[in-house]
Amino acid sequence: MIVEKRINNNVALARKNGQQLIVMGKGVGFGKHSGDQIAEDQVEKTFYSEGSLNLEQMASLITDASGADIEAVDGIIRYGQVQIKESLNPNIFFTLLDHICFSLQRYEKQMDISNPLDWEIKKFYPIEYGIGKFAVTLIREQLKVNISDAEASFVALHFVNAQIESSVHHEGVQMVEMTNDILQLVRYQLNCDYDEDSWYFQRFITHLRYYLMRQKNGVIQENGDQNELVDMVFSRFNKEKNCVDLIDYYLQEKQGWHTSNIEKMYLILHLRNLVEKKNRL
């Protein structure tokens, strides 16, 4: 691994096997010049250019941030990774660092902003929202900055984005808006008023979010040997089938996504369970 540019004592722009990357680790940039070797055992994290960020932008973000800012973001991501238990786009480090540095600047200028999707994020993405609340507490304690509670939902969206392999903020917003639209569609079509604190509602929301992520990532589930089961569910639950067909139409019109029959079957079963449990209350 060869140094191309020292960024600071703990960060450097490097090249490995012909590919540029950013490396982080205690002392990796200390006293280094272009062409120097970096010991592999010094490197704690590596970042490659992905999505909308290039290496120059990534390096600039780190250069402009303080060591305390970088440490805080690293702590938030470590905590978030434990909570989510799934792989995250590594570029979340830079998008979150950029957001938090900007939030600190807003605080200095007394420019508080609210998130109009705060309620939806809290309901649809409780794990990510919990990470956001942790982030707010950590920043207040470690950086001694009393940032707004509203930052929790903004941080949550970064973790939503990182799971759908996007570094673009609006992708997470779109997911929240589509989830809300689908819930309104289901409420109208099935005349179902949800108990949003119930386990059945949360189970449906969990299925819905991963269904949307699969659609976003182009993951198509095939019927396999379950054609008879699919046909039986379609014929038995007509109201739910019509509702799911409308969801499919909505997503085709909005995103150009097509829902496979096996995905429709699972949605029907979740809807049936949601309505049935609600009616028993």
Image (cartoon, rainbow, N blue to C red):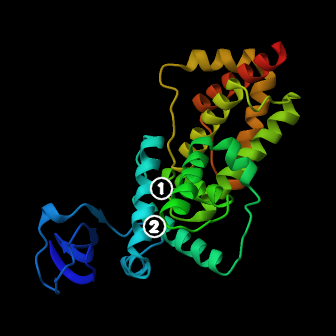
Q: Amino acid at mark 1?
A: Glu
**Distance from the alpha carbon under mark 1 to that under mark 2:** 8 Å
Q: Amino acid at mark 2?
A: Gly
Q: Which mark is residue 165?
A: 1
Is residue 93 visible in the rendered image? The answer is yes
Q: Residue at x 14, y 61 (%)?
A: 41
x, y percent for residue 214: 54, 43
Is residue 91 visible in the rendered image? The answer is no
Query: Which secondary structure lies at badge 2?
Result: loop
Query: Which secondary structure lies at badge 1?
Result: loop
The picture quadrant where one finds residue 154 is: bottom right
> Is 30 positioned to the left or the right of 230 in the image?
left
Disc 2 residue crowd, few under 14, some 14–19, many 20+, Cα 10 Å: few
Number of numbered discs = 2
**Above-or-below relation of 196 to 142:** above
Q: Which mark is residue 155?
A: none
Disc 1 residue crowd, few under 14, some 14–19, many 20+, Cα 10 Å: many
x, y percent for residue 51: 45, 67
Q: Which residue is mark 2?
A: 51
**Above-or-below relation of 254 to 31:** above
The picture quadrant where one finds residue 60 is: bottom left
- CB atoms of marks 1 and 2 within 8 Å: yes
